[in-house]
Amino acid sequence: MRHDQQQTVLRKLFLTFSSLKYRVVGFWICFPEAERSVLKLEYAVFVEKNPKACTCIRENLSFTKLTDGGKLLNMDVLQALRSLEGGEPFDCIFMDAPYEQHLEQPVLEYLADSTLADENTLIVVEEDLHTDFSYVEDLGYHLVRSKEYKTNKHVFLKK
């Protein structure tokens, strides 16, 4: 998938997921044969440890008709990633962990050596403005972009 196509898909998904408070770990995007200009979500994996939040995610998956294309894992994120190993790499991985708890670093460390992310995977981390990402290059990532807002930022990474 080209970078501009990933950006288009991400814009659409950010609007959808942030309005529904999803915690997205990763998703695959398919290009329908009939119309290459139309991008659609083929499959998404959601990870959430909190059972009450999982209930909300299930309702949102049903409401958005993503029940068949969405898998919800009610467990710790590193446990979830280990359970997903061996499959195809994700096109995009979006992390929205609680701010200021530095939960993104162990996930990025795991993904650095994982088959779930390859050189074509776009990793997006949402975190507070003060989170330091200077360590990502040591893990083998390069910073594609960082977009800052009033209280948070999106950091775009690739291997």
Image: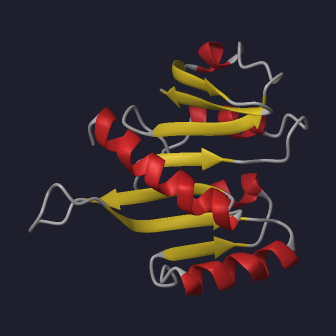
In this rendering, position of residue 28 left or right of residue 113: left
In this rendering, position of residue 3 left or right of residue 36: right
Q: Position of residue 68 (x, y in %)?
A: 46, 84
Q: How many marks?
A: 0
In this rendering, position of residue 52 left or right of residue 4: right
Could you say which quadrant of the image residue 45 lies in? Answer: bottom right
Check the image and name the residue furthest to the left.
Answer: 34
Q: Position of residue 143 (x, y in %)?
A: 54, 19
Check the image and name the residue furthest to the right.
Answer: 101
Q: Residue at x 55, y 62 (%)?
A: 16
Residue 60 in view, yes or no: yes
Of 11 and 111, nearer the camera is 11
Could you say which quadrant of the image residue 17 lies in? Answer: bottom right
Q: Position of residue 92 (x, y in %)?
A: 47, 47
Of 4 and 102, nearer the camera is 4
Q: Residue at x 8, y 68 (%)?
A: 34
Of 72 and 115, nearer the camera is 72
Check the image and name the residue furthest to the front.
Answer: 150
How is the rendered protein coloured?
secondary structure
Could you say which quadrant of the image residue 106 lies in? Answer: top right
Of 114 and 40, nearer the camera is 40
Q: Is residue 61 above or below residue 127?
A: below
Q: Is residue 128 above or below residue 17?
A: above
Quadrant location, the N terminus: top left
Q: Residue at x 39, y 65 (%)?
A: 41
Q: Residue at x 11, y 65 (%)?
A: 33
In this rendering, position of residue 86 left or right of residue 1: right
Residue 90 in view, yes or no: no
Q: Position of residue 95 (x, y in %)?
A: 66, 46
